[in-house]
Image (cartoon, rainbow, N blue to C red):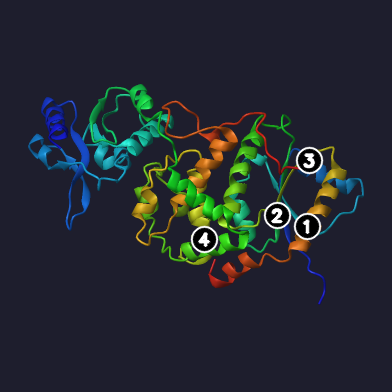
């Protein structure tokens, strides 16, 4: 059997991480192809339901990334997002969802190399964890 | 409770309130909410150990509002709810008459929300029992927790009694009712149940005052207030913020501090 290739969904903000990932490409830096990037106006727009929906649609891992604190295009979107993640992450843990499947980072438009390194490290981590079987079982049991 | 009935009779006779929301005797030894508009019915009000429903849920209802100014019988958790509703601009000082009842059953009519704040201030959010129960679940392994919750949530048949009973679930259109996109699957299968309960808890994060009404309303005895209790504990430890203690406080998730500390963002 071939090696397990995880599906990773990346929710990124338009102004920093998306541009950063773009820089990774234009700099010809290679990184793991497991990631599917979804662009958002701001990390503040990334509702926790989107993360659940990513899992429900077969994601093995999730990346959430945006502008560094104090760099938000909308001044405070990432600060609000940070609080939401702090709370949501602990709720996920409490309800038994493995928080090691959800990775957060601040990656600016200039950090193309950090994006590549981050995606590679997340991909390696998720490979170690294996497929998201708990969630897959739920999905198989019900009609979404 | 003669004192309560007398106060209510006076309030209704003087016309300063049009309806009183309180507890009355139901059938089979159960307590039910009563809405008293006629001073002659004031004697049907009761208050005893069985009166646990959070009556603040009715305060914002259109059907009650159109009757005119309301008075509400309010034990501690209802008082907290009223403060939280005020903090969320759903109530203003003086909108309702608050008939507070303390642990000993003593009636206090609060003339303003500042007095209510002073009354609730010494009370903790979580009881020792509740903390212990949380600790027990937190000590489980990740897998055990997942199985525990899957087992509990598998009973849910999505009656949404938890939502209906919650005084802070007052959105006129709930995410769960939205079908374009369909955020929460309609059938009560495992994935939809999980998403519903996570969403409900998250939407109450930083707002829940731990009245426990959701769990009491649940016909299948799912301990879903554990989720919000966990959030209460979390928000107080991470942000040092509490809901239901002030009529002016900001919700933990609608505000931020530039130096909020986390340890998981790379």
Q: Quick check: A140 left or right of B9?
A: right
Nearer-the-camera pick, B57 or B138: B138
Task: Compare residues A111 and B181 and report the one nearer the observer.
Answer: A111
Q: CA–CA distance between discs 4 and 1?
A: 25 Å
Q: Which residue is mark 2?
A: A100
As drawn, the label of residue B149 is: 4
Along the viewing direction, whichever of B225 and A101 lies nearer the viewer: B225
Q: CA distance from mark 4 to mark 2?
A: 19 Å
* Cα–Cα gap, marks 1 and 2: 8 Å
Question: Which chain hosts label 2?
Answer: A
Asked if labels 2 and 1 touch by Cβ distance under 8 angstroms, the answer is yes
- Residue B73 versus residue B199 in the image, above or below: above
Q: Element under label 2? A: helix
**Which of the numbered marks, if any, corresponds to residue A125?**
1
Say which quadrant the N terminus of chain B sits in: top left
Determine the CA span between mark 1 and mark 3: 19 Å
Are dots 2 and 3 in contact, CB under 8 Å?
Answer: no
- Disc 4 is placed on an element classified as helix
How many numbered discs sit on the rendered protein? Answer: 4
Residue B76 at what x, y percent from top left? 33, 36
Q: Position of residue B36 (x, y in %)?
A: 16, 39
Query: Dot 2, crowdedness within 10 Å: few (<14), some or many (≥20)?
Result: some
What residue is rendered at 47% in x and 62% in y? Answer: B153
Element assignment for label 3? loop
Labels 2, 3: front one: 2
């Amino acid at each position: 059997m071939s090696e397990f290739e995880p599906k990773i969904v990346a929710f990124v903000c338009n102004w920093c991480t998306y541009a950063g990932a773009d820089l990774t490409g234009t700099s010809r830096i290679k990184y793991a192809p497991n990631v599917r990037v979804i662009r958002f106006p701001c990390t503040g727009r990334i509702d926790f339901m989107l993360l659940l929906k990513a899992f429900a649609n077969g994601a093995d891992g999730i990346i959430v990334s945006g502008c560094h604190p104090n760099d938000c295009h909308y001044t405070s979107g990432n600060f609000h997002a940070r609080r939401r993640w702090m709370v949501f992450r602990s709720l996920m843990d409490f309800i038994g969802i493995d928080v090691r499947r959800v990775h957060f980072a601040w990656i600016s438009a200039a950090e193309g190399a950090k994006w590549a390194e981050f995606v590679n490290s997340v991909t390696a981590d998720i490979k170690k964890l294996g497929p998201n079987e708990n969630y897959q079982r739920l999905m198989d049991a019900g009609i979404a | 409770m003669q004192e309560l009935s007398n106060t209510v009779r006076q309030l209704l006779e003087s016309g300063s309130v049009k309806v009183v929301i309180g507890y009355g005797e139901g059938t089979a030894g159960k307590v039910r909410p009563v809405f008293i508009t006629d001073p002659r019915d004031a004697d049907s009000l009761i208050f005893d150990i069985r009166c646990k429903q959070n009556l603040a849920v009715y305060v914002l209802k259109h059907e009650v509002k159109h009757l005119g100014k309301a008075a509400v019988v309010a034990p501690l958790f209802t008082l907290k709810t009223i403060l939280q509703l005020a903090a969320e601009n759903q109530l203003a000082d003086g909108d309702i008459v608050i008939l507070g009842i303390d642990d000993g059953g003593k009636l206090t009519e609060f003339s303003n929300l500042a007095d209510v704040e002073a009354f609730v201030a010494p009370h903790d959010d979580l009881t020792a029992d509740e903390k212990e129960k949380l600790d027990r679940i937190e000590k489980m392994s990740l897998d055990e927790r997942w199985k525990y919750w899957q087992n509990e949530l598998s009973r849910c048949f999505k009656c949404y009694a938890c939502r209906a009973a919650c005084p802070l679930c007052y959105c006129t259109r709930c995410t769960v009712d939205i079908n374009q996109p369909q955020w929460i699957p309609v059938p009560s299968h495992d994935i939809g149940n999980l998403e519903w309960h996570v969403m409900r808890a998250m939407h109450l994060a930083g707002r829940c005052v731990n009245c426990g009404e959701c769990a009491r309303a649940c016909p299948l005895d799912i301990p879903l207030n554990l989720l919000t209790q966990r959030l209460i504990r979390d928000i107080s430890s991470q942000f040092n913020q509490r809901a239901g203690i002030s009529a002016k406080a900001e919700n933990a998730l609608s505000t931020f501090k530039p130096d909020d500390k986390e340890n998981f963002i790379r």
